[in-house]
Image (tube, rainbow, N blue to C red):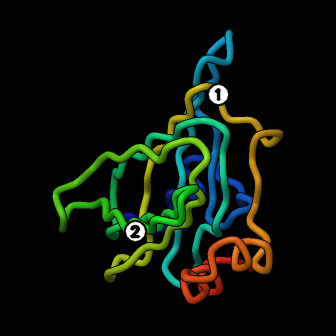
């Protein structure tokens, strides 16, 4: 049986600052795009963060993963990826704040993420709970749930 620990070991994943585990699997020579594999365990979450690039999510295995997004205009959107919802791919647009969690009973969700142009920690902002709540007070409950 495939477990979160076996995936972490097989792919030599390391902790991601936003939560979960990852490993970069590709970086284009011209930095046009990059890809990672990403594993999120149940009871953990990927905290709200923002990128200056679009990010394509591809669900591979395990639980349904839920992506919570807050658009710059304050609109909230919840997207589910996984076998149970027959939705396997989604693009988070640059500039949106987003967080994710996995639900169901496998204990993990395994995904791939491709960032265009390539991901760089210089273009990554981890949300500050107080600042994000001040900016979007109507989403205080979800911001508190998915920030550290």
For the point 53% across and 45% down, the residue is 37
Give the answer, above or below, for where 122 lies relative to 63.
above
For the point 71% across and 58% down, the residue is 16
Give the answer, above or below, for where 144 lies relative to 123.
below
Instruction: Report which residue position mark 1 lands on.
Output: 118
Is residue 39 or residue 72 the one in the foreground? Answer: 72
User: Which is nearer the N-term, disc 1 or disc 2?
Assistant: 2
Asked if disc 1 and disc 2 are in contact, CB closer than 8 Å, the reply is no
Q: Position of residue 28 (x, y in %)?
A: 62, 16
Circle count: 2
Q: Secondary structure at mark 2?
A: strand
**Quarter residue 134 falls in:** bottom right
Horizontal arrangement in the rendering, residue 121 relative to residue 139 (left or right): right
Horizontal arrangement in the rendering, residue 58 relative to residue 25 (left or right): left
Horizontal arrangement in the rendering, residue 30 relative to residue 35 (left or right): right
Q: Position of residue 107 (x, y in %)?
A: 42, 78
The residue at the far top in this view is 30
For the point 56% across and 34% down, the residue is 115
Instruction: Report which residue position mark 2 lands on.
Output: 66
**Quarter residue 135 falls in:** bottom right
């Amino acid at each position: 049986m495939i477990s979160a620990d076996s995936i972490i070991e097989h792919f030599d994943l390391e902790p991601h600052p936003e939560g979960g585990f990852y490993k970069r699997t590709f970086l284009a020579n011209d930095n046009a795009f990059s890809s990672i594999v990403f594993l999120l365990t149940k009871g953990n979450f990927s905290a709200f963060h923002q990128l200056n690039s679009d990010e394509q999510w591809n669900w591979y295995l395990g639980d349904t993963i839920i992506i919570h997004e807050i658009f710059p205009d304050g609109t909230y959107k919840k997207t589910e990826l996984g076998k149970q919802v027959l939705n396997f791919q989604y693009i988070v647009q640059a500039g949106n704040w987003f967080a994710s969690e996995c639900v169901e009973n496998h204990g993990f969700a395994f995904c791939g993420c491709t960032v265009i142009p390539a991901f760089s920690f210089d273009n990554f902002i981890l949300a500050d709970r107080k600042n994000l709540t001040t900016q979007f007070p109507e989403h205080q409950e979800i911001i508190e749930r998915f920030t550290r």
